[in-house]
Image (cartoon, grey):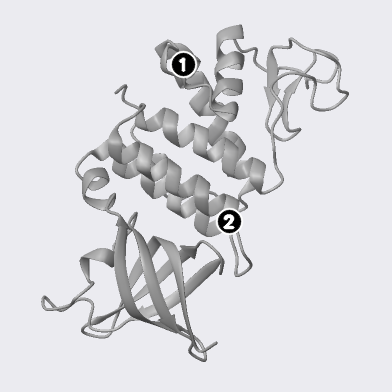
Amino acid sequence: MPVYRDEAVVLRTHKLGEADRIVTLLTRTHGKVRAVAKGVRRTASKFGSRLEPFMVVDVQLYEGRTLDVVTQAESLGTYGAEISSDYASYTAASAMVETADKLTESEGSLQQYLLLVGALRSLSRREHGAAATLDSYLLRALSLAGWAPTFEDCARCARPGPHSSVVVQIGGIVCDDCAPPGTPKLSEDTIALLGALLSGDWEYADAAVARSRDQASGIVAAYTQWHLERGLRSLPHVSREPR
């Protein structure tokens, strides 16, 4: 069909000419789509503010040869303003949409779409700390992409835990026999926090102490950078300040 409609999250935008913009969208059923929003940078544009990063929209597009064309856009989740007003939330959301951009292609990615929408909604409502919300999103997005870490049994030999070493190159926690020499040990609280972030146990995650949060964030960042070949440009700018 030359014209189609879908729900979408705006991942990023680029200027095109004097008034247009290229918009990268993660859609509910069509995967990742790049489209031209014509005249969107003019003050009289009917849907300019709806096609900003972190916004969730009901969008109608016309299929083009190289890029599709946005013909209509209606707001479904106006998360952009709330997220952009808080630095920690903004940097976390920037890392989220960059991750989604790297993990998704043109095929359908419903689970990734729903996960991203939920994470952006949570950030906009300040339901949890921005850094913890990001860490949970990253672990779960990587899991959906086929890189699920283990924080219980040994990732190499499957020996039952508890263990205290994490090696991101191996896939998570490892026993003492499988850990390379010099692998640092993590506290039980940090290991438990990583598991809670992966499973969405927010009662435990919200109660974690600062030291465990910092250690867990370091592991999540390293695990993410390892699996995304070129890493995330936005991740070093993420604010790790407590909520």
Circle 1 sits on which residue?
203
Specify the quadrant that holds the N terminus: bottom right
**Label 2 is placed on what type of residue?**
Leu
Circles 2 and 1: CB atoms closer than 8 Å? no
At numbered mark 2, what does the secondary structure look like: helix, strand or loop? helix
Residue 188 rendering spot, x and y as whole percentages: 61, 8
The residue depicted at 43 percent of the width and 49 percent of the height is 117
Disc on the earlier residue, 2 or 1: 2
Horizontal relation, residue 116 to residue 87: left or right: right
The residue depicted at 27 percent of the width and 53 percent of the height is 78
The residue depicted at 69 percent of the width and 32 percent of the height is 149
**Label 1 is placed on what type of residue?**
Glu
Specify the quadrant that holds the C terminus: top left
Residue 182 occupies which quadrant of the picture? top right
Q: Nearer the viewer, residue 66 or 211?
A: 66
At numbered mark 1, what does the secondary structure look like: helix, strand or loop? helix
Residue 224 rendering spot, x and y as whole percentages: 58, 41
Q: Check disc 2: other Cα within 10 Å, few if <14, some if 14-19, many if 20+.
A: some
Horizontal relation, residue 43 to residue 190: left or right: left
Circle 2 sits on which residue?
110
